[in-house]
Image (cartoon, grey):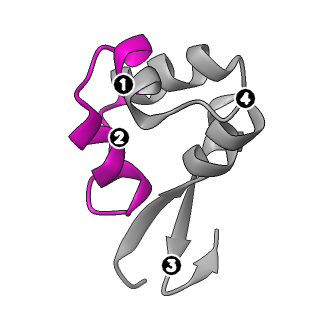
Amino acid sequence: MGKLHISNNIRKLRFHNNEMTQQQLAEKASVTRQTIVALEQGKYSPSLELAFRIALVFNTPLEEIFFIENKGELI
């Protein structure tokens, strides 16, 4: 098995939630805007706690926000 990569739908969810800004999401999730930027760009994998906080902000199941890719293939 190759290296796993956690991807997400955060940008799409922000857009579908009244075009929420990165700053607004950051404040609701109690992190910095830079953390949200890094998450959206796939440069940072969230802690389990942060992943759940983001899921609560969007009122969306965790697996609809975050997913694992293996060399570009969904698992």
Spatial CA distance of label 1 from label 4 is: 14 Å
Do callouts 2 and 3 mark residues in contact (Cβ within 8 Å)? no
Please state the horizontal and vertical placement of residue 55, each as a whole percent of the image: 58, 24
Residue under label 1:
26
Label 4 vs label 3, nearer the camera: 4
Image mark for residue 36: 2
Q: Is residue 23 above or below residue 68?
A: above
SS under mark 4: loop
In terms of sequence position, does the residue under pointer 2 or pointer 3 come before the other? 2
Q: Please, what is the three-letter code of the amino acid marked with disc 4?
A: Asn
Query: In the image, which disc is placed on residue 17?
Result: 4
Q: Are marks 3 and 1 in contact (CB under 8 Å)?
A: no
Q: Amino acid at mark 2?
A: Ile
The C terminus lies in which quarter of the figure?
bottom right
Residue 28 vs residue 68, the one in the foreground: 28
- The part of the chain drawn in magenta is 26-48
Q: Secondary structure at mark 1?
A: helix
In this picture, residue 63 sits left or right of residue 11: right
The Cα atoms of the two marked residues, 1 and 2, are separated by 6 Å
Lower position in the chain sequence, tag 3 or tag 1: 1
